[in-house]
Amino acid sequence: MLLSPPHIGNLELEFIKTAFNNNWIAPAGPQIKLFEQEFCKAVGASHGVALGSGTASLHLALILAGVQAGDEVFCSTLTFVATANPILYVGAKPVFIDSDYISWNMDPNLLAEALKQRARIGKLPKAVILVHLYGQSADIDPILATCNYYGIPLIEDAAESLGATYKGRSTGTFGHIGIYSFNGNKIITTSGGGMLISEDASLVARASFLATQARDPAPHYQHSNLGYNYRLSNVLAGIGRGQLRVLDQRVAARRFNYDRYQQSLGHLSGINFMPALRCSQGTRWLTSLTINADEFGVTRNEVRERLLAHQIESRPVWKPLHLQPLFSGCECIGGAVAEKLFQEGLCLPSGSNMTETDINRVISVVSPPVLRPISMATL
Ligand SMILES: *Cc1c(COP(=O)(O)O)cnc(C)c1O
């Protein structure tokens, strides 16, 4: 049983056939525009450009925000490495910000304090990247207010939170730029892909230009800027159009998984499920919980190994980026909360195609009576 496998609906193949029938097997074609329009409608964004990956979208977002070599970018520390890799692509320096226990996401107070100090010494970052971890929204309002106060662009990494809302509005649409991912393990997939959105049409047009090798308008091939090959294929945009039709069902299924896990395991001493802000509705992309070994009697690692022995994939919560060898020497503001969540946190299988039997099997393996020492016979 996998953590988060792809889950294809009924229309994807039809849209792929359309692409084949009119020979748009290219990183251009009619389905791309339609996918962008339908996606923007789904999240309530004004402009969007479909790209090759969420990572590529973040890379272009940083370029659009004017981040250059030597600049600093503030970034959530508790996240997947793809959130921060693009900071290194542009030669900038990440400064990581710790989470709080209320949201597991960037602590708004820590950010406000850090920016206040930086303003005092005249060394503000060029951008802030905010992650909505595992599909649950960060506390966006105070974070956006702080960024606006100092005139710093906020980039929302909503790769895991497509379908989530904060105060009734889609995550990813609050910041100056938002990005999403359609990787195979995300809420919906195009096998690989991403989207960059903004209210500013000129930013999105610029992203599209940079993603198409920055070709100047001329009959010959003329280039004045450094460009990239970051556009999404028209075939994959077709998959995305089909996936968008079932987005609400996919989110509902993942939220259902979380509820079932919570009902069966939430009362156990030492187990705490990832919270969600009351003003938000998360996607529960991955059901995540912490295991306090003293109270539960078994460590997080033992639970993970026991699941593995039953061919069930589970994963520790993301290792904070300030602990990653790749980012050694980078500054981190706070860090203890993310470290604790990494030590105790576990993500359970959460695919939208899980059956009731699958969920019950995970629950029975995690539940204490089954967690007696593994006898060789059961392996
Ligand atoms: C998956 C993911 C990304 C990267 O998206 P890709 O489409 O795989 O490049 C970025 N940030 C977070 C938080 C992710 O989970």
Image (tube, rainbow, N blue to C red):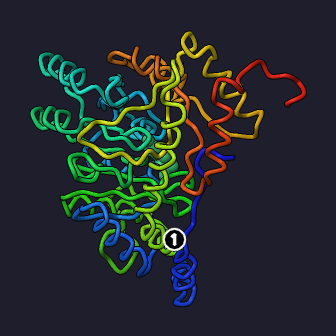
> For the point 24% across and 30% down, which residue is it?
125
Q: Which residue ends up furthest to the top in the rendered image?
A: 294
Q: Residues within 10 Å of mark 1 (few under 14, many from 20)?
A: many
The amino acid type, in three-letter code, at marker 1 is Ile
Q: How far across and how far down the image is residue 3, in percent?
A: 61, 44
Q: Nearer the viewer, residue 295 or 188?
A: 295
Q: Is residue 254 left or right of residue 60?
A: right
**Is residue 290 visible in this depiction of the protein?**
no
Q: Which residue is mark 1?
A: 239
Position above or below: 225 against 15 = above
Q: How many marks?
A: 1
Q: Nearer the viewer, residue 328 or 373?
A: 373
Which quadrant: the C terminus? top right
Q: Nearer the viewer, residue 145 or 230?
A: 145
> For the point 36% across and 75% down, which residue is it?
33
Q: Would you identify the image quadrant in which residue 129 lies?
A: top left
Disc 1 is placed on an element classified as helix
Q: Which residue ends up furthest to the right in the rendered image?
A: 377
Q: Nearer the viewer, residue 203 or 48?
A: 48
> For the point 85% across and 22% down, which residue is it?
375
Q: Is residue 364 left or right of residue 211?
A: right
Position above or below: 281 against 273 = below
Q: How far across and how far down the image is residue 184, in percent?
A: 57, 55
**Is residue 43 visible in this depiction of the protein?**
yes
Q: Is residue 274 left or right of residue 343?
A: left
Position above or below: 3 against 354 = above
Q: How far across and how far down the image is residue 10, in percent?
A: 55, 75
Q: Would you identify the image quadrant in which residue 111 lies?
A: top left
Q: Which residue ends up furthest to the bottom in the rendered image?
A: 21
